[in-house]
Image (cartoon, rainbow, N blue to C red):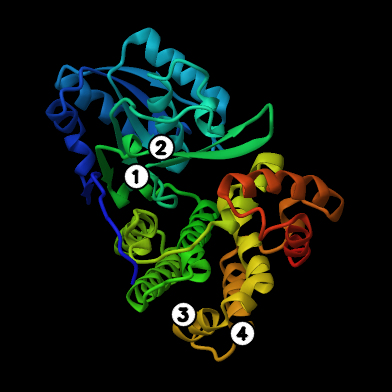
C-alpha cells in the first residue's frame, strides 16, 4: 500500500428533508448573495426551486438565477454565469441539480476571480488558486462532483471536453436527499449507473499498486450499484435503494477508493470525453459503450485484476466471461454498448480518434493510447 494523504473538506448532509437547512447553512458561512445555478425546469415543476428561494429569503440571502445548464455542460454557459456573478456581486455559488450543474458551478466559481478567460484554466494557461465558495443540493446521483474538486466542461467552438481540478473547488456543503432524485428518468438512471461503475474501475484496473482493501471497497460499491439499479428499475419508489445508489455514487469519486493506490489513469473518461464533445452523447451512455470495448483491449496488461473482477463481481471464472457479464448487464438495463446505438458510425472514427489524442495528452497517457490503440478500442464497440 502506497503512502497517501486523504483530505476531503466537503460536509455532506444526507437524507430526507436536508434541503430545508440550505438557508441556515449559507448563513453559517456568511453568505449574503448567491448565484443559483440549475439545469432543467424539473426543479421548478417539482417545487424545489420555490422551496430553496423561500429558505434563502427567510435568512435574508439574495439570489440571482442561472438556469438552462445542459447535460454536457458548455463553456459559453459558464462564461454567462461568470458575467452574471460579477455584475450582481454574488459572494457564493449554489448549484441545484446533477453533475453538469455542479461542474458548471465549479467552473464559474473558479472563473469569477480569474482575470483572463475561464478556458485558460482548462488548457493549463493558468492555475486555480482561489474560487467563490460553492454549495450544492443534488438532484441526480452519478458524477460524485458533490464531494470532489473536479469539473468537466465542453468548449463548443473547439469541440474539446476538458477538466479542471483544484482544492478550492471542493463544495463547502453538499446536500444529498435521495427523495429529490425520484424524478430522474429511466434513461438517466441507467446512464448514471454506468458512470459510477466507470469511476470505480479506472484505478481498479489500471493502477500499478491497488491494495486488496481498496479492491474490495470498489467491488462492494459496484455490487451496490448493480443491486440498487435493478431495484429502482423494478420499483422507482424504492427510496432505500435510491439512497444506497446515491451514497455509492458519492463514494466512488470522493478520493476514498484511490487511497493507497498508485500509477493509475483515466483512459475510459479520456476516450468518452471525445464522444461527448463531438456527438453530444450523454456521458454515462458513452461510458457504457467505451468501458467494455476498452476492457477487451486492455485486460492482458493486468490479467490478475480482471480475473478478480470476474470472480468477485459476477461470480464467473474467466476474464472474457467477466467482461461479457458487464456488457450483458449494461444491455440488460438498457444503456448502450455499441457506437451505432449512439449514432456513431465507422466513418466517424478518424475524427473521434483525433479528438481523443488531445484528451490523452491532457491525461498524460498519450504514449499508451496511440491513434492505432484508440482505433482498436473503438472497433471493439462497432
Q: Is residue 144 left or right of residue 13?
A: right
> Which residue is at a point 50% across and 17% down the rendered structure image?
116
Query: Front-most of 274 and 168?
Result: 168
How far, Cα to Cα, is label 2 from label 3? Answer: 31 Å
How far, Cα to Cα, is label 4 from label 3? Answer: 11 Å
> Which residue is at a point 82% across and 53% down the rendered structure image?
345
Q: Is residue 195 left or right of residue 250?
A: right
Q: Quadrant of the N terminus?
A: bottom left
Residue furthest toward the right?
347
How far, Cα to Cα, is label 3 from label 1? Answer: 26 Å
Residue furthest toward the bottom?
317
The residue beneath circle 1 is: 146
Q: Mark 1 or mark 4, which is nearer the start of the sequence?
A: 1
The residue beneath circle 4 is: 321
How far, Cα to Cα, is label 4 from label 1? Answer: 34 Å
The residue beneath circle 3 is: 313
Task: Assign a secondary structure to mark 3.
Answer: helix
Location of residue 221 (image quadrant) = bottom left
Which label sits on residue 102?
Answer: 2
Position of residue 31 measured from the top left corner of the image (x, y, whole percent): 20, 22
Disc 3 residue crowd, few under 14, some 14–19, many 20+, Cα 10 Å: some
Amino acid at each position: 500500500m502506497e503512502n497517501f494523504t486523504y483530505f476531503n473538506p466537503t460536509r455532506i448532509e444526507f437524507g430526507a428533508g436536508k434541503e430545508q437547512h440550505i438557508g441556515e447553512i449559507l448563513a453559517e458561512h456568511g453568505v449574503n448573495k448567491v448565484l443559483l445555478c440549475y439545469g432543467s425546469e424539473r426543479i421548478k415543476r417539482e417545487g424545489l426551486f420555490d422551496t430553496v428561494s423561500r429558505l434563502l429569503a427567510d435568512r435574508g440571502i439574495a439570489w440571482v438565477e442561472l438556469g438552462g445548464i445542459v447535460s454536457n455542460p458548455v463553456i459559453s454557459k459558464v462564461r454567462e454565469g461568470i458575467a452574471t456573478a460579477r455584475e450582481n456581486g454574488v459572494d457564493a455559488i449554489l448549484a441545484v441539480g446533477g453533475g453538469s450543474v455542479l461542474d458548471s458551478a465549479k467552473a464559474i466559481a473558479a472563473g469569477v476571480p480569474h482575470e483572463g478567460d475561464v478556458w485558460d484554466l482548462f488548457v493549463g494557461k493558468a492555475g486555480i488558486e482561489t474560487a467563490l465558495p460553492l454549495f450544492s443540493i443534488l438532484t441526480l446521483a452519478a458524477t460524485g462532483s458533490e464531494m470532489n474538486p473536479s469539473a468537466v466542461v465542453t468548449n463548443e467552438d473547439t469541440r474539446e471536453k476538458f477538466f479542471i481540478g483544484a482544492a478550492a473547488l471542493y463544495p463547502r456543503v453538499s446536500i444529498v436527499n435521495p427523495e429529490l432524485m425520484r424524478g430522474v428518468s429511466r434513461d438517466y438512471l441507467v446512464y448514471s449507473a454506468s458512470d459510477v461503475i466507470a469511476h470505480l474501475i479506472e484505478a481498479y484496473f489500471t493502477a500499478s499498486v491497488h491494495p486488496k482493501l481498496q479492491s474490495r471497497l470498489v467491488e462492494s460499491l459496484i455490487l451496490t450499484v448493480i443491486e440498487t439499479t435493478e431495484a429502482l428499475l423494478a420499483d422507482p419508489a424504492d427510496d432505500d435503494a435510491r439512497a444506497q445508489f446515491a451514497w455509492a455514487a458519492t463514494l466512488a469519486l470522493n478520493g476514498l477508493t484511490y487511497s493507497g493506490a498508485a500509477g493509475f489513469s483515466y483512459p475510459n473518461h479520456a476516450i468518452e470525453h471525445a464522444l461527448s464533445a463531438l456527438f453530444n452523447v450523454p456521458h454515462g451512455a458513452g461510458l457504457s459503450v467505451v468501458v467494455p470495448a476498452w476492457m477487451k483491449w486492455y485486460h492482458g496488461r493486468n490479467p490478475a485484476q480482471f480475473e478478480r473482477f470476474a470472480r468477485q463481481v459476477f461470480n464467473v471464472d474467466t476474464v472474457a466471461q467477466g467482461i461479457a457479464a458487464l456488457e450483458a448487464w449494461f444491455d440488460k438495463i438498457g444503456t448502450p454498448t455499441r457506437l451505432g446505438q449512439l449514432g456513431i458510425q465507422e466513418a466517424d472514427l478518424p475524427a473521434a480518434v483525433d479528438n481523443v489524442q488531445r484528451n490523452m495528452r491532457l491525461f498524460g497517457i498519450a504514449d499508451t493510447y496511440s491513434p492505432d490503440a484508440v482505433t482498436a478500442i473503438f472497433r471493439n464497440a462497432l
